[in-house]
Amino acid sequence: MTEPQFESLDQMAEATASALSQACAHSAFELFQKAPFRQEARFEKINQVEQDRIFNELVVAHLVLTMLLLEAPDLRVDPEFRGYLRNLNQQIPKGYVEQLRTLGLEAEYIKDWDKLIALRYEEYARDRHEVRAAAMELDSAEKPLDLEDLSKIQLLVPVQAVAIGCHHHICRGETQRRDDLFKVILESLSQFYVQFRVRFEGGKITPLTRAKVALKKAIRRKKKKKKK
């Protein structure tokens, strides 16, 4: 097969965004279909409309996580590549909405999707600061933070912020005694995040491998925060 030819970087960004948004939807569907997720999301007690709402939240979580990954300040890419990633970041929502339009979704629902993605992006991007501060506070209570600790915290902020927010919306804010659901969401989003981050960084996986251990702290951190 021949490589596709693009007339401009914008055209390439549009095609890449379309592929990434499809990958987001696919990963969201895989999580949606998993028995542990369905069990913890209590599918046997909710109707189809509520199940559809939950699926939409999973799709948006993957889309926003991809956007946050593309703009992560610690993403190890060549400086001249940053401009392209900013363009790609902006194309992600358009890529998914265009897929929905191609599938025949009505214009009014297209607008709803535009609003939902923008709303969740604003929310999860804002929540990164609280997640980072909480992680630094918790880790520094155990020992003085060094550069490696700070690097791990920064690395995991996007996936933790999105997982916490997604969990909150799926539960409609009623997150008490729903820690197992959070764990399922966090583990799935983490795998997605690591997979795509490694690709963008050209296979440089060592820091990510070390950071995986820190993901377990996110669950403990959430539990400790609830007890306060």
Image (cartoon, rainbow, N blue to C red):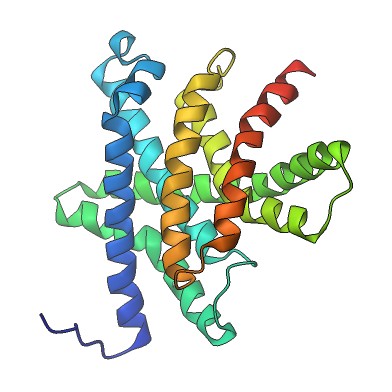
| 17 is higher (above) or lower (below) than 46 | below
x and y percentages locating residue 97 in the rendered image: 30, 55
User: Where, quadrant-wise, is the N terminus in this rendering?
Assistant: bottom left
**Lateral position of residue 168 relative to residue 94, left or right:** right
**Looking at the picture, how far across and down is residue 86, in whole percent?**
51, 73
Q: Which residue ends up furthest to the bottom in the rendered image?
A: 7
**Quadrant housing residue 31:** top left
**Relative to the observer, which residue lies in front, 201 or 5?**
201
Name the residue at 45% across, 69% down: 203
Left or right: 33 with respect to 179?
left
Location of residue 49 in the rendering, given as x and y in whole percent from the top left corner:
28, 22
Q: Residue at x 59, y 40 (%)?
A: 215
Task: Locate residue 109, reporting x and y percent.
Answer: 28, 43
Work out whether residue 109 or residue 126 is closer to the camera in this orientation and state it: 126
Q: Check the picture and name the quadrant holding the C terminus.
A: top right
* Quarter location, residue 154: bottom right
Between 53 and 26, which is closer to the camera in this rendering? 26
Mark count: 0
Res. 15 image quadrant? bottom left
Q: Is residue 46 visible from the viewing direction of this image?
A: yes
Q: Residue at x 83, y 40 (%)?
A: 137
| Residue 161 shows in the view | no
- As drawn, 167 above or below 3: above
| 37 left or right, relative to 178 | left
Q: Residue at x 43, y 46 (%)?
A: 191
Residue lying farthest top? 45
Report the residue that reaches farthest toward the left.
Answer: 1
